[in-house]
Image: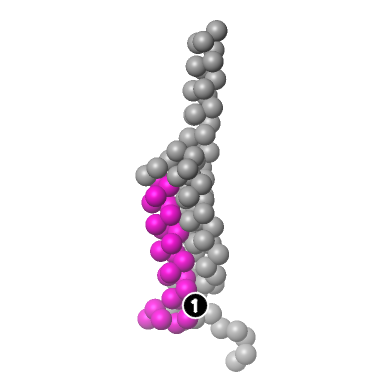
Amino acid sequence: MSEEVGKGDRRADAAKLLGARISCMVGLIFGAGGILFALLGAGASVSAGAVGAALGVLGYFLGARRLGAATVVLGVAAVFFMAAASTGILPGVAPAGHGYE
């Protein structure tokens, strides 16, 4: 009986870790995609970086410690990078226009 309980706990832990890793990978995609879109001038909304950082925090608390920390760092860096790109601070990256020209 206790072996079946142990298997259930291991399955629950494995599912939790899988969810953590998926959350972190999606967060990394959001962070890297936000930086890429800011570089290409397609848009510089900081929400992609914020969502990426939030998914990294979720992954960290679900058990993917290193990957979660890396995701949070990339998400926060993406927020700062996109904020800088949207204000025109970065050389070579034009801020998004408002269509008034």
Q: Say which of 45 and 42 sits in front.
A: 45
Q: Residue at x 41, y 81 (%)?
A: 89
- Secondary structure of residue under mark 1: helix
The x and y percentages for residue 76 are 43, 62
Q: Quadrant of residue 35?
A: bottom left
Q: Which residue is situated farthest in the right direction here?
A: 100
Circle 1: residue type:
Ser
The x and y percentages for residue 93 are 43, 78
Q: How many marks?
A: 1
Q: Which residue is situated farthest in the bottom direction here?
A: 101
Q: Quadrant of the C terminus?
A: bottom right
- Residues drawn in magenta: 67-92
Magenta span has 53?
A: no
Q: Which residue is situated farthest in the top direction here?
A: 1
Task: Answer yes or no: is residue 98 visible.
Answer: yes
The residue tagged 1 is: 86
Q: How would you rate the neighbour count of disc 1 (Cα within 10 Å): few for under 14, some for 14-19, many for 20 or more?
A: many
Q: What secondary structure characterizes most of the magenta part?
A: helix
Q: Residue at x 41, y 64 (%)?
A: 77
The x and y percentages for residue 16 are 52, 34
Magenta span has 85?
A: yes
The x and y percentages for residue 45 are 54, 70
Q: Say which of 31 and 63 sits in front.
A: 63
Q: How is the image coloured?
A: one colour
Task: Answer yes or no: is residue 42 visible.
Answer: no
Q: Residue at x 38, y 51 (%)?
A: 70
Q: Residue at x 60, y 84 (%)?
A: 98
